[in-house]
Amino acid sequence: MRFGLIVVGDEILSGRRRDRHFDFFRGLLAEHGHALHWLQILPDDPVRLTARLRQTMEEGLPVFSCGGIGATPDDHTRQCAAEAAGVPLVRHPGAEALIVERFGEAARPHRVRMADLPEGAELIPNPVNQVPGFSIREHHFLPGFPDMAHPMARWVLEHRYADAEGEAERSLRVPGVSENALMPLLQELDADWPGVKLFSLPRRGEAHFVELGFRGPRERVERAFEALKRALEEAGFPWETEGGR
């Protein structure tokens, strides 16, 4: 499956903090046989965030969102998620119970606002301080803090997407050739194998070659990759993998 990643926070865009989510999510998704399809860093702007969430929810693909689910005035993500999903923001009794259990009397009046979630949202457990994230419309909302967000994201993958078909990537090298010479073959393969992504990466230097491959659902990638090798051999182009033919 292909996932999107939204990182919310003016502090990332201003450089006060560095993003620590991109590399982690790319590796985590690959570890589970999935792929990171896109990344977007958004400001703490409720209009812009609502518009983007509405768009991604309409697309129907899974998305992780990190940041903006706290209780301070600049945390807009919970309200934006509700507006994007077309549901009200309501007090979630399970989230409220967890927050009160964790903070006691100090939960009110401010921290308990983190239990105000889009109606119908499902909770994502937080192993660090027990304040949960939430899921709605295949969007999974996590804190901005990596030490919380990252184990929570792993829980989401293991509990919600364990049975999803994994993605794969296979590639090879065609030495001493230009992309232009390969273009007719690439166009034919691209047309023959919809549903997987064909990529071509020219490399310059002492070892001049073009890296060709497919990325997508595992079974279909394997079949497309075999077709790529046959097409190269029939066209007279030698090829090699990192470990040799």
Image (cartoon, grey):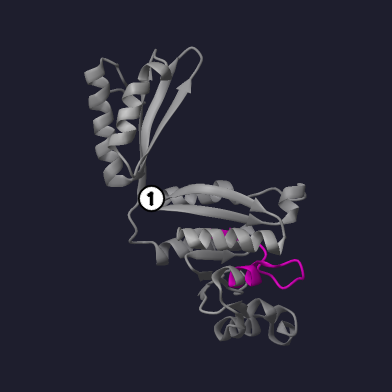
Residue located 51% across and 64% down the image: 139
Foreground of the two, 201 or 150: 201
* Up/down of 143 relative to 192, above or below: below
Tell me if residue 126 is in the magenta stretch: no
Residue located 29% across and 16% down the image: 237
> Please, what secondary structure does the residue beneath circle 1 have?
loop
Q: Quadrant of residue 164?
A: bottom left
Foreground of the two, 186 or 135: 186
Residue density around tag 1, few if under 14, some if 14–19, many if 20 or more, within 10 Å = many
Q: In which quarter of the image is residue 88?
A: bottom right
Tell me if residue 80 is in the magenta stretch: yes
Q: Which amino acid does label 1 sit on?
A: Gly
Is residue 8 in sight in this rendering?
yes
Left or right of 210: which side holds 118?
Answer: right
Span highlighted in magenta in the image: 64-82
Is residue 243 in sight in this rendering?
no
Quarter of the rendering occupied by the C terminus: top left
Residue located 27% across and 39% down the image: 222
Residue 183 in the image, given as x and y percentages of width and height: 37, 22
Residue 174 in the image, given as x and y percentages of width and height: 36, 20
Foreground of the two, 239 or 77: 77
Figure label count = 1
Residue located 59% across and 64% down the image: 142
Residue 229 in the image, given as x and y percentages of width and height: 26, 27
Q: Name the residue under label 1.
A: 33
Residue 110 in the image, given as x and y percentages of width and height: 74, 80
